[in-house]
Amino acid sequence: MIVTRTWLEEWVELEGISTAEICTKLNAIGLEVDALKEYRMPEKIVVGRVVTCEKHPDADKLSVCQIDLGTAVRQIVCGAGNIAAGQYVPVATVGAVMPGGMTIRHAKLRGVESDGMVCSAEELGLPRLGEGILVLDESVGKLEPGRELGDYALLNDDVIEIELTANRGDCLSIHGVARELSAGFDRPMKPFDYRIEEETAQGIGRIFQFTHQGNPEVSLLYRAVEVNEAALPLLLRLRLALVEADAKEGIDGFLAYAIHTGGVVLREYGFSKLAQSEGKAELRLKEGAGGLGLLESGGKPVGIVGIRQEAAVRADTSETRLLLEASYVAPELIAPAVKEQKLETDPLYYRTSRGSEPDLDFGMRLLGWLLKRYTDAKIYTGCSEYTTLKEPLRLDISIEMIESIVGQPIAVNRVVTILSKLGFRLVKSEAGKVIVDVPLFRHDIINRQDVVEEIVRMVGIDNIASRPMRFMEANRVTYDLRRYRFLRDIRLKAVANGFFETVHYIFCDNARLRELGLKPVKDGKALLNPITNEMDGLRPNLMVTMLDSLRRNVAMSKRRIPLFETGRVFDEERNETFHLLLAYSGEKEMEAVPNAGKPAPIDFAAFADKVAAVIGVFELRACEPKNALMHPYQCAEIVIDGEPAGVLSKLHPLVARAYDLPDTYFAELEVPKLQMRHVNAGAISAFTPVQRDLSVVVPADTSYTQVRWALEGYLPETVQRFFPIDRYSDESLGDAMSLTLRFIISSMEKTLEEAEINAIMEKVLERLRESCDARLR
């Protein structure tokens, strides 16, 4: 953010404060000054009025001018093509030393005497303001021939460049920085009470129709204006150039100046570009994905509020009737939407994504004031608007809390003064506490500590006395400690169940990922300088790197290979998560007498039991393979407490063959979905539970999941649990199968009678008939 001293002085009282003190204060309150540059007009450069301007007799590109310098009229030869009689121009008189070091002397150019030089902006040390000489106007002060340019304060300015953090969008304007200095120096802000003068008898509703559909989370304000000539005055062009803004001519220049001054995002439309039937302009606001505001005219898109505006609807140089728009969208809404939807943006998106000024009326009044002051603009009566109401965040802050954080007492009245000058609205001030509403332009304030930080900024770190550090014993059972203990317990359980821990780099080979049908990190977020070509990617799961360890163990003649690993994995966007992998290859047990030295290979059920021994109870649900590592017919989703937590699968035969592996199974889970689950203990019945088996015939394609879903939540509380114990099919059953379920039945109050148990089983059978087309076997 770049500001100038004279520009700031239009909004805050800075009399008696040097520019060096302003820079020191900005640094002290957290707005780091990156650069300071002073612009001063050299001596003997004065205002001149061009009396006459004639072509040089011997040079087509030179003009011979008679210029009034107040005390005398001097003849000066000028090579600029834009010089003309009647202009006021800067003249370097004989003896003046230019910023570049050149001394002006009396000269004869192509035989014509010349007493001085008419200067361009660059020759005066100012930024470039177009071709040719600098033409002065009274926006910089009353022009008096012979008066030195050094006497014009608006041409002798100090430019301060501030390095802002991304969360301080409220300081992306002159008004925002002035507000910070007002609080820092305890100086008053200068009032801005301008009200737009509506001079035309015709209201905006007669020439413009604005409608909306849905409830997009945006705010818009429209006004209509007629501007026959919108020449940007010198002061505005100069200031825009000093702050490195795009100093365009016409209405765009006024918009750029108003935006940089007030922080409100402003745009313009040509009425003819929006004109529909009967010459009436039309805009329609629609709700888009993520609450964005989509603008249409005549069924065609013309922009997305706060993100972009189509170039085709902007006014061209011949357009005199314009539609002015002020807009606001919350940055927490717009920035994620642009990223997720990959939307095209325009230059003003930078402001909206960091938090623009939400007071649209202030921005429109500021623009109206500029147009009325420097042009012949006529503003139509009334306005059209759409507003999304947002309640300000209300916080109560105790003085005790402030003092505990700051380390020293701070008077309540000083706290109130600081917060008021920063735009906070005082709701109530009572004994030892203040209640404030956070201004809507402060998107970075979300809690009490943030408000205290604002107070500390304005008090100043250097003004807070040093005190001995006081140590207090705190609760050391933090989230990080609980997480460490959980991971330690998981490792110990895995080792206790025969698994061996492995550790791999997080890097992997992108070529391997593509062969396995896995998606590597996107190009824009990929590693720039990989260690080797085989480590040029980031692993999307732990099994990718585990394959090498499994193959290495097989090559070393290991016949039973149970391995596990915990580590970080990365998705396409380089978002990382922490995973646990359990992998098992080869024989499911050690060679021993019971298996005659020939143990069976690991199978799906045996591996699932081993996983359960490590992570506890879980449910398996059928799923489609999520990548090329998973077997298409032997894979399942692991569900814990009703939430998907990972996958359990046999390794795809093609991958196993490529790595010379026997039957291999793996389970990969997201650690955050495993850890620190709270288990509520339940009462145990004092009465002996009863077991009842129920055998039913159901269609052969019926899954146990269907049966479980049919019974869960339907059975009485006396049914403690149920589970399958047998599944049988043969030719006599045809397209059906026999399924046997075991029910554990117990009452907390008494021993159940046989009739009561039979009634429960009848209810179960009836439910299975209705939901699973079952019949008693």
Image: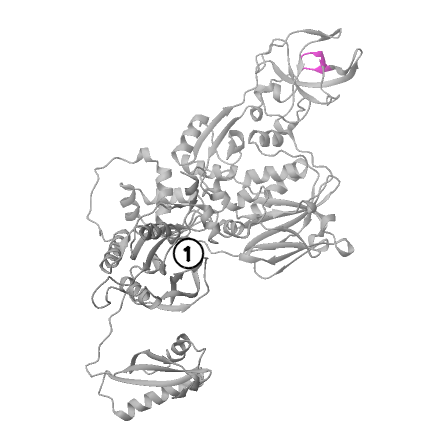
Q: Does residue 130 sit above or below 777 in this rendering?
A: above
Q: Is residue 678 magenta?
A: no
What residue is at 39 percent from the left and 42 percent from the top? 418
Q: Residue furthest bottom?
A: 755
Q: Quadrant of residue 228?
A: top right
Classify residue 619 as left or right of residue 190.
Answer: left
Give the residues drawn in magenta, as a range: 66-77
How many numbered dots are placed on residues in this image? 1
Between residue 421 and residue 707, name the one nearer to us.
Answer: 707
Between residue 747 and residue 71, name the one nearer to us.
Answer: 747
Classify residue 435 as left or right of residue 254.
Answer: left
Q: Position of residue 458 (x, y in %)?
A: 38, 38
Q: Quadrant of residue 668?
A: bottom left
Magenta: main secondary structure:
strand
Q: Does residue 220 sit above or below 97 in this rendering?
A: below
What residue is at 57 percent from the left and 43 percent from the top? 348
**Is there any visible trace of residue 70 in the rendered image?**
no
Between residue 642 and residue 311, name the one nearer to us.
Answer: 642
Q: Secondary structure at mark 1?
A: helix
Q: Which residue is mark 1?
A: 657
Q: Tag 1: residue type?
A: Arg
**Is there any visible trace of residue 206 in the rendered image?**
yes
Q: Position of residue 372 (x, y in %)?
A: 66, 39
Image quadrant where one finds the C terminus = bottom left
Q: Position of residue 260 (x, y in %)?
A: 56, 38
Q: Position of residue 732 (x, y in %)?
A: 43, 87
Q: Quadrant of residue 455?
A: top left
Between residue 191 and residue 691, name the one nearer to us.
Answer: 691
Q: Is residue 73 magenta?
A: yes
What residue is at 44 percent from the left and 41 percent from the top? 527
